[in-house]
Each structure stands twice: as structure tokens, then as C-alpha cells.
Amino acid sequence: QVQLVESGGGLVQAGGSLILSCAASGRIFSTNFMGWYRQAPGKQRELVAGITSGGSTNYADSVKGRSTISRGNAKNTVYLQMNSLKPEDTAVYYCNAVISAYGLGDHSYWGQGTQVTVSS
């Protein structure tokens, strides 16, 4: 069984920064992609940033230039640093990973979500 555990959400003032963390655990053979999605009330879930096992990254236009996604040394962790936060960044942030697990093959896994609220 594979689990993703997120941390780092909370309340922050506009213009502030925060770092979201996500750690995958379980019988993991390889982690092929890790990323962060977000969903605001009444809106569809959207990709915020993603990073492949080779280190290639992509960002939503709305966060490009003020966010950085990175993977930890353990390779099963991913971080999202967000700067210059805006009220429109308020959402539940979800970690996603495409993982090859022993005996299970490739699957997409989701974390439970962490709330980020940016006050104006």
C-alpha cells in the first residue's frame, strides 16, 4: 500500500510565503512523477506544479515565477515553495504521485489535501 502525507498548509498573509511538503511511503519501486494540484471552492482541480523523476518541471501560469517545486534527496518527497502569495492562491492543495509499487504496477496516488488560506 502506498500513502502520500502532506504538510505545510495554513493561514498566511498576502505577500507571504509557505512551503508544502509531501512524502510517499510504502513498497515503492520508483516514483515517476510528483506534483501539486489545488482546488478552490466551486472550481475544478488544477495542476499547480509538477516534477518528473528526471527533474523536469512545469508550472501553471498563475504561479510561474513565484513558486518552486523540488524533490528531496529521498526522491519520494516533493516540496512546493510558494512566494508572493495572493488571495486567489487560497485552495486545498493535493499532492499527487505516479508510483511504481512492488506487486502493484504504476498507479496515480493522492494525498488527503492541505488547506492554504491567503488573507488580504
Image: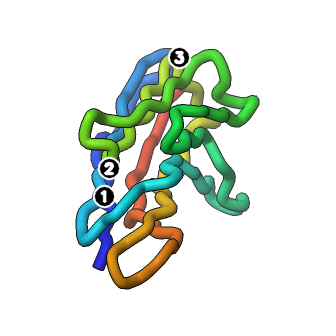
Question: What label does residue 24 carry, if any?
Answer: 1
Which corner quadrant holds the N terminus?
bottom left
> How far is mark 2 from mark 1, CA to CA?
5 Å
Looking at this view, is 98 or 4 the one in front?
98
Secondary structure, mark 2, is loop
Sequence-earlier tag: 3 or 1: 1
Element type at marker 1? strand
The colour mode here is rainbow
Along the horizontal axis of the image, is 44 left or right of 104?
right
How far across and down, in percent of the image, does residue 110 sit? 45, 66
Residue 47 in the figure: left or right of residue 28 = right
Q: Residue at x 40, y 63 (%)?
A: 111
Q: Report, in whole angstroms, how far the alpha carbon at label 3 lies from the one at label 1.
A: 28 Å
Secondary structure beneath dot 3 equals loop
Residue type of the residue flagged with mark 2: Asn
Per the image, the residue denoted by label 3 is 84
Count up the numbered dots: 3
Q: Camera-side residue: 69 or 17? A: 69
Q: Earlier in the sequence, mark 3 or mark 2?
A: 2
Q: Which amino acid, mark 1? A: Ala
Q: Is residue 15 above or below residue 2?
A: above
